[in-house]
Image (cartoon, rainbow, N blue to C red):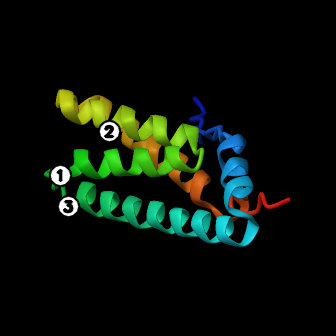
Amino acid sequence: MTEVAVLRPREVVRQDVDTVAEIYRNLGAPTAEQLVTRALGDLALTMAGIVEKVRAQDLRDLGGQLARLRRLADDIGLVTLAKVAGDLQSCLERADGTAFSAVWARLMRVAERSLSPDHGIADLSG
């Protein structure tokens, strides 16, 4: 009898810590922490809206939401999240359903790792 292996991909999430460090240098720790925390909240809300639209198979305006996700992720140095959001936007624009499904699964994994409390992006004040 053949054994079936269950694959559980684990994404490596790249973060540009210099982006957040610059925010802290320019604004000071208290203000920067508020800004980064608010940005993470905006990212989470944007991602939740995207999840809702995809689950409902309502792809209208999804490109705009993905662009927003990408921009927000870029602003705080979440390199992998920004890249995968852009990749999904490309799949959507090309109407490539197979690629969309694969990249969607990857976006979910990357978003989960990027936005998890143990990721530590908001705790770079030194």
| Mark 2 crowd level (few <14, some 14–19, many ≥20, 10 Å Cα) | few
How far across and down, in percent of the image, does residue 50 sit? 31, 57
| Mark 1 crowd level (few <14, some 14–19, many ≥20, 10 Å Cα) | few
Secondary structure of the residue carrying numbered label 3: loop
> Disc 2 to disc 1, how far (Cα)?
18 Å
**Residue pictured at 45% horizontal, 44% vertical:** 107
Check contact, mark 3 vs mark 2: CB within 8 A: no
Mark 1 — residue?
61
Position of 67 with respect to 61 (left or right) is: right
Mark 3 — residue?
56
Q: Which mark is residue 101?
A: 2
> Disc 3 to disc 2, how far (Cα)?
14 Å
Number of the front mark, 3 or 1: 1
Amino acid on which disc 3 is placed: Ala
Amino acid on which disc 1 is placed: Asp
- Which sits earlier in the primary sequence, circle 3 or circle 2? 3
Check contact, mark 2 vs mark 1: CB within 8 A: no
Quarter of the image holding residue 48? bottom left
| Mark 3 crowd level (few <14, some 14–19, many ≥20, 10 Å Cα) | few
How far across and down, in percent of the image, does residue 112 sit? 55, 55
Quarter of the image holding residue 58? bottom left
Amino acid on which disc 2 is placed: Ser
Q: Quadrant of the N terminus?
A: top right
Closest to the observer: 66 or 25?
25
Secondary structure of the residue carrying numbered label 1: loop
**Residue pictured at 40% horizontal, 51% vertical:** 69
